[in-house]
Amino acid sequence: MKRVYVETYGCQMNVADTALILGRLGGEGYVATEDPAAADVMLVNTCAVRDNAEQRVIGRMGELKRHKRPGVVLGVVGCMAQRLGQELLREAPHVDLVVGPDGYRGLPALIAGAMNGARSADVEFKSWEHYEDIPAQRADDRVGAFVTVQRGCDYRCTFCIVPMTRGRERSRKLADVVSEVEGLAAQGVTEVTLLGQTVNSYHDGEYDFADLLRAVGGLSEIRRIRFTSPHPNDFSDRVILAMAEVPSVCEHVHLPVQSGSSRILKRMGRRYDREGYLDCVARLRSAIPGLAITTDIIVGFPGESEDDFLATESLVREVEFDDAFTFRYSPRDGTGALQLPDPVPEAAAGDRLQRLIETVRQVARRRNVALVGSAQEVLVEKLARRGELLQTRTRTNKIVLVDGPEEWIGSYRTVRLTGTTGATFTGVPAAAGKELAIMG
């Protein structure tokens, strides 16, 4: 029996790609293991969005090297592999293969070659590759599932390396996506998250993202639909109407803004300004009452002044984000931002990041405290790290810790929110007669 160990870094797309890798190798007789020391093949599925993510992977590859023995293969796959290619083979002699996101179909042959001493890289973009015939091997305990509907990106944000690691945008056929979700529903999955680099720009040549939401929403077994990550420019009236009219589409949007300054947004190549972003938020909230909005924000982008940063802080307060992923700008080879003048000193960028984090926390806590005492439908996802509690999630993507039996995992419950730390809630099952318990 051949064993494969896969360690995953980065976004939900990488999580979905790991399931594809395991499915492809599973078809060749490989069995997944959580112990790298027991593996015949060790793969690290990588992110290249920020430099610190790559440095973590480089350090981790050095640690995994100790598990190598004759015939054992150590490989790097994903976005970092795509970016570095042959260079990674030259710089890391303990790495046997390097495979980009479009090369997973060829993994069995590449692994076989590596077991016989060949070191190779496959970082060719394949515009036709959607892996339609490869069944994903997802984690057994997953009550929801990621479904990739689109690959690549045609936007050219000056800070972003994704177009260079994922290639041009292309969408799967709507019928193929629906067929995959039908298969997941038959396995008991009731929540799906549709994935794409700019997912709401989905278009398969005939159908757009609004059509996709309605088609997946037409499957009665699917109670919740989420999607990530959209682009503010691609929220057409059709898409927003579909979100409002399809009951299974959750009341949560992760809407990256990156900056609250129109001047910096222009330097970033985001193709909208502050007012355009706020207009998108207003249209979404007008159509979808109770919508929760989260975002991504970068500080310290080249040329960012203190006034630009204050504009970002004020946007956070104006939109009242439910949460935000905040980052300090990370230079990436090959991106347009490297040519921009006026770099922000590290100390100033670090200070702004800490101030921004505090502002985000204040706003999110205020919104969350207002929810305490309300009743919310939650999906019970898994055992929580904290004691004997269960981790559950609301339709608006709030995490709620609830005391209950493990048998509840996969079910929907109505809980009353009893408290919040500012980010996570505690809750108790609703009073008898008001509890919703539909097993997934």
Image (cartoon, helix red, strand yellow):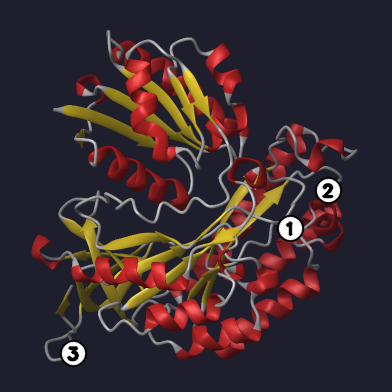
Image-based side of 217 in relation to 324, left or right: left
Earlier-in-chain disc, 3 versus 2: 2
List x then y, in percent, for residue 371.
Answer: 41, 78
Mark 2: which secondary structure? loop
Q: Tell me, yes or no, whether the two marked residues, 3 and 2, touch with CB atoms within 8 Å.
A: no
- Of the residues shown, which amino acid type is indicated by label 2? Glu
List x then y, in percent, for residue 231.
Answer: 64, 66
- Of the residues shown, which amino acid type is indicated by label 1? Ser
Q: Tell me, yes or no, whether the two marked residues, 1 and 2, touch with CB atoms within 8 Å.
A: yes
The residue positioned 42% from the left and 81% from the top of the image is 215
Mark 1: which secondary structure? loop
The residue positioned 60% from the left and 89% from the top of the image is 286
The image's mark for residue 304 is: 2
* Nearest to the observer: residue 65 or residue 331: 65
Provide the residue designation for mark 3: 434
C-alpha gap between disc 3 and disc 2:
52 Å
The residue positioned 28% from the left and 72% from the top of the image is 182
Q: Residue furthest right?
A: 341
Image-based side of 429 in relation to 304, left or right: left
Residue 325 in sight: yes
The image's mark for residue 259 is: 1
When the figure is inspected, residue 185 is found, relative to residue 308, above or below; the finding is below
Q: Tell me, yes or no, whether the two marked residues, 3 and 1, touch with CB atoms within 8 Å.
A: no
Earlier-in-chain disc, 1 versus 2: 1
- Of the residues shown, which amino acid type is indicated by label 3? Lys
List x then y, in percent, for residue 169.
Answer: 62, 57
Q: How many neighbours does mark 1 have within 10 angstroms: few (below 14), some (14-19), or many (20 or more)?
A: many
Mark 3: which secondary structure? loop
The residue positioned 73% from the left and 40% from the top of the image is 349
C-alpha gap between disc 1 and disc 2:
10 Å
* Nearest to the observer: residue 117 or residue 293: 117
Earlier-in-chain disc, 3 versus 1: 1
